[in-house]
Amino acid sequence: MKPTVALSRRSALSLSTAGLISAAGLPLFGQDRAAAKRKLPMSTIFKGEATFKKIVKKATDENWKALAIGDRIIKFARELHGKPYKSFTLEIDNKIESPSVNFDGVDCWTFFEMSLGLARMIGYERSEYTPSDLLREIEFTRYRAGYCGGNYLERIHYLAEWYFENDARGTIDHITDSFGNSKKISGRKVQEMTVLWKSYRYLKNNPELRTPMKKWENYVANMPVSYVPKDKVAAIEPKLKDGDVIGIATVHDGGFCSHVGLAVRTNDGVMRLMHASTNYKKVVIDKSISGYLNSFKSHAGIIIGRPLEVSETVTDSKIYKANLKKLIG
């Protein structure tokens, strides 16, 4: 499967990508090559195949493909409602990095990522859908340039970067600044991974990764990250849509975001945060987004990404690099 190149909304400019990315020498959009390079067994990288098959059968029987992508995302997200919260499900090996899926337990990132991945997967016409199909979608959104060759540093580790990367590849529109009341975060120290390296299996077992990881943290720290302050969020809730990816901006150093979830409007008309919660220890549909923000002093506001249909996916490396350059400067 190769997503189509979207030329309608992404112009093909002859710009180079960010210098750090070029220096890293990351391959671009090599999904088939990535699959060939995976050295970890399917039993390690994909947990819960029976659950996957059950959910996909329901989606195909009810023709979720015909829904708009935001509605599809929430359909899949609701199938994960109540799933237990489980940390560090991506730390699956001491050496080899690989796209992975775990239906037995999710954290805040893997919850929204799996919901998005399933919605994108079902957007392609197939006679049947396999775990490998979902892994390809996870790979495309989880890794820089949509490619994983087995290197831990290829993964997008900070959520703020995820918005820029996935906007550049046409999986979302990074719409935070479109509401007219956003605010830029300046002088933020991005250092969680290198300060807390003992918590991360790959960094703990591969000390040589810590120095280049710091370079990536510096790269992320220099990104033009904006957020909608939490006292402005109630006013924009009517404009949010089901399936919007809601990053929770934090007031603390370490990174730009502390949490993430999905926007979902319930039958009472309230736009709520659906997320894998450490407090509830499971996936829940919580308070209104503004109400959730106001429950925590450390929450500064939100970052918003609006998912795009698979027809908008960018697979041309020149367009991707031009888009990224334009977004991050």
Image (cartoon, grey):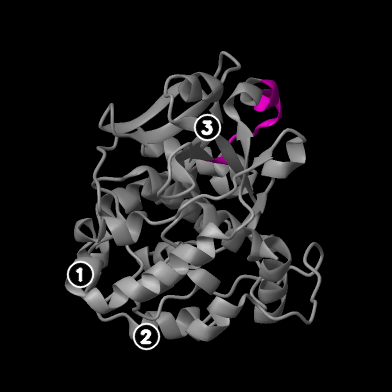
Whether residue 102 is visible, yes or no, is yes
Answer above or below: position of 180 versus 39.
Answer: above
Badge nearest the viewer, 2 or 3: 3
Residue 239: say if magenta. Answer: yes
The location of residue 126, given as percent across then percent down, is 52, 65
Task: Write the start and end of the magenta stretch as one range.
Answer: 235-246
The location of residue 85, given as percent across then percent down, is 26, 39
Residue of label 2: 36
- The answer to which of 179 and 32 lies nearer the viewer is 179
Residue of label 1: 93
> Which picture quadrant has residue 233?
top right
The location of residue 222, given as percent across then percent down, is 58, 60
> Which picture quadrant has residue 40?
bottom left
Mark 2 / mark 3, whichever is N-terminal? 2
Residue of label 3: 300
| For residue 52, side relative to residue 303 (left or right) | left
Label 3 residue SS: strand
Q: Residue at x 67, y 39 (%)?
A: 183
